Image (cartoon, rainbow, N blue to C red):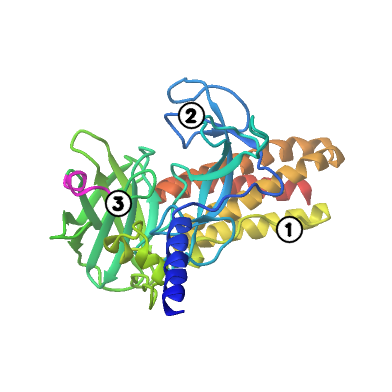
Amino acid sequence: MRGVASAICVLMLLTAAISAQQPRTSAPAKLPPLSYTCAHHPDVLEDKPGVCPLCKLALVPVRLDSSWMCPVHTTVIETERGTCRLCRRQLVPVTVSLTWSCRGDNAEHLEPGLCSDGSPRIGQRALRPHGNHNPRHGGQFFMAPDSWHHIEGAYPTARSFRLYVYDDYGRPLPADKLKDVEARVVTKETFDPATRKTTELSAFPLRVARNRAYLEARVDTATLPAEMTAKVRFASDTDEHRFDFTFDALTKEPAAPASVPQAAKASPATAPAAVSSAPAAPAASQPAAGVDMPATMAGIVGELQRKNTEVRDLIARGDFAAVWVPAFAAKDLAISLEPHLAHLAVNKRDLGEPALARVVRGAWLLDAAGDVGNRQQIEAAYSTFSAGVADVVAAFQ
């Protein structure tokens, strides 16, 4: 009996290890709508066919959905939040593309259906470029304006700033590429609005830490909240990019789970070096999107004002990565007000119609500026957004 039990145990472990390497996929109850993206610039997303504004190539259709992924075992992609079945880490929210295929056929389809042999197509969820904006080290995560690199700034101890650099899938930059990065962290500077010139008063070079996959600098800032700016050139022949950080507290490395299941230890997909650097996404930076739409015009206007306040407060405390949530909720509120324009007096309608357009445009600007973490861009976008909100309130009240 002992031999039979051992054989069953080994079989269970092998089955778990093999299945753990396969992403669990299923078609959502209602398929997400088709979007159109550029094959070379995946950050370009439109709701109808056209050409890429950057390279002029024809946009291609894609079906996007939200999923939950293990920060270490990236083949583990689930449809609901929870823990990784391999390492028990908290899954993080990501954006994936949905496709369906048939066994023995490399063709990908954007719809579920039947294969030539009558079997159902197999659903697949694949991480999309720019689909993983989760910090790994408890810091603040931004996308670079070059639409490829991503960075995370961390403040683990007083006077110590760290910069982690990732690719478009959120993977750490290889050591040979990390050495090409030229960067410094600025803790004091002045900006002259008349000349639009910035003068740095206190700056420190960021250098690759010995035997570590990040750049680090010893800074003069010791009090909280700590404001600092990383200025980064990813190669000597590329443009310099600015990333603004505000740390209300010291950042903390996410704790690893106390134990790892035996199936995970048996799986060849488990990489010990990657285990120590896998966090859960901070809840404050990953709020749920959407808004409960009020039933009345006055209720919509009141909710729009509240979302404007949320955006303002997030910018004030430097939580740029979360700005898109209330901004997009405000966008949806503004769109819902469009049918009510017909009920306004002519002078109010002339004020309200362009104001709604400014709110929608301001929301997209805030989303783009929040991704790159540039305070000047975010404040300029908020100026457009808040002015639109003020005019909407004046028109509809």
Against 277, residue 117 (above or below) is above
Q: Which residue is mark 2?
A: 38
Q: Amino acid at mark 2?
A: Cys
Residue at disc 1, secondary structure? loop
- x and y percent of residue 375 in the render? 40, 51
Give the label on residue 292, or none: 1
Residue drawn at 68 percent across, 41 percent down:
356
* Nearest-to-viewer mark from 3 and 1: 3
Judge the density around disc 2: few (<14), some (14-19), many (≥20) Cα neighbours within 10 Å: many
Residue 321 image position (x, y, % from top left):
46, 55
Q: Which residues are magenta?
A: 172-179
> Which residue is tagged 3?
172
Residue type for callout 1: Asp
Q: Residue drawn at (43%, 60%), measured in percent from left and top?
A: 17
Mark in front: 1 vs 2: 2
Q: Height in image: 148 above or below 208?
A: above
